[in-house]
Amino acid sequence: MTDRAPQAAADVPGAPAEPAGPAPLGVVRTPTGHAGVDGLLERLAAVDHLTADGHAEVYEDVHRGLRDALTALDAPPVPGPYENRS
């Protein structure tokens, strides 16, 4: 019999390593000056705290918001309340 404590799986050669938890990617998010777009870009910070399988939902949400912001740029301006006077 030996006095050694059992080794953890990570200490045993050839044993599968434990999966790493979420880790920040360190991606710099530069403000654009457009509050809506900046808010969407900050939402990307949420993936730093999620496992990889949770990233898709955040990316799709941000993509949808950015697409809507771009689409709004092509929309004709809405007349103000006093612009319809004759």
Image (spheres, rainbow, N blue to C red):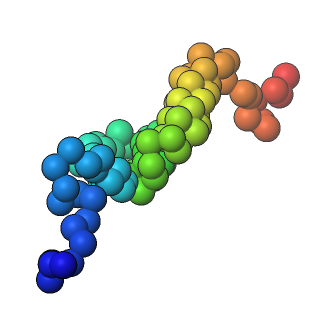
Instruction: Judge left or right: residue 29 versus residue 71.
Output: left
Q: Nearer the viewer, residue 54 or 74?
A: 54
Residue 65: % across, % down? 58, 34
6 w.r.t. 77: above or below? below
Q: Quadrant of the C terminus?
A: top right
Residue 58: % across, % down? 53, 41
Residue sitting at x 42%, y 57%: 49
Residue 4: % across, % down? 15, 78
Q: Quadrant of the N terminus?
A: bottom left
Is residue 4 visible from the viewing direction of this image? yes
Instruction: Judge left or right: residue 55 versus residue 45.
Output: right
Residue 12: % across, % down? 19, 56
21 w.r.t. 65: above or below? below
Instruction: Judge left or right: residue 85 versus residue 11.
Output: right
Residue sitting at x 45%, y 49%: 51
Q: Nearer the viewer, residue 86 or 16?
A: 16
